[in-house]
Image (cartoon, rainbow, N blue to C red):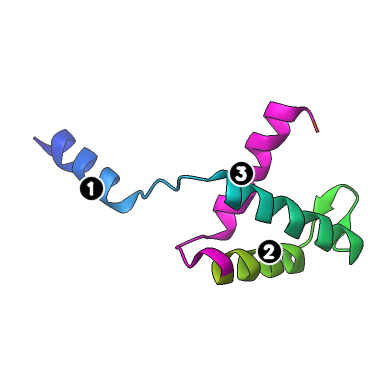
Amino acid sequence: MAKKMASQGDTSSKDNLRWTEEMDVAFFDALIEECSKGNRVDGTFTITAYDNILATLKASFANHLRKDNLKNRLKILKDHFGV
């Protein structure tokens, strides 16, 4: 019973974000812009870069994005494309 309640709590507190192709394109554009601004140091995006990207994507798509969503998406894209 406790296990069932815990799993129900996990699903309600965990919202899965579905990335669209349009979101990916906007994400790529924002990543490129932050690189050109110098907000990528030693191959890692800075906190400022993630803040700027987050603001850009939230303005365009008005959803509940978080920095963790951006970091996870970047990790997935690196794994898929070997960047």
* Other residues around mark 1 within 10 Å, as few (<14) / some (14–19) / many (≥20): few
C-alpha separation, residue under disc 2 versus residue under disc 1:
30 Å
Q: In the rendered image, which residue does mark 3 sit on?
A: 73
Residue at image point 82% right, 62% down: 34
Image position, residue 79 (x, y; %): 69, 29
Left or right of residue 73, residue 31 in this image: right
Q: In the rendered image, which residue does mark 1 sit on?
A: 9
* Other residues around mark 2 within 10 Å, as few (<14) / some (14–19) / many (≥20): many
Front residue (pair 20, 77)? 20
Left or right of residue 74, residue 23 in this image: left
Image position, residue 50 (x, y; %): 69, 62
Q: Quadrant of the N terminus?
A: top left
Q: How many marks?
A: 3
C-alpha separation, residue under disc 1 versus residue under disc 3:
24 Å
Residue at image point 67% right, 68% down: 51
Amino acid type at circle 3 is Arg
Left or right of residue 64, residue 44 in this image: right
Numbered disc 2: secondary structure: helix
Q: Quadrant of the C terminus?
A: top right
Is 61 inside the magenta-drawn segment? yes
Amino acid type at circle 1 is Gly
> Quick check: 16 above or below 58?
above
Main secondary-structure element of the magenta-colored stretch: helix
Span highlighted in magenta in the image:
60-82
Q: Which mark is residue 53?
A: 2
Image position, residue 82 (x, y; %): 78, 27
Residue placed farthest to the left in the image?
1
Residue at image point 78% right, 61% down: 46
Residue at image point 51% right, 60% down: 65
Left or right of residue 15, residue 51 in this image: right
Front residue (pair 74, 60)? 60
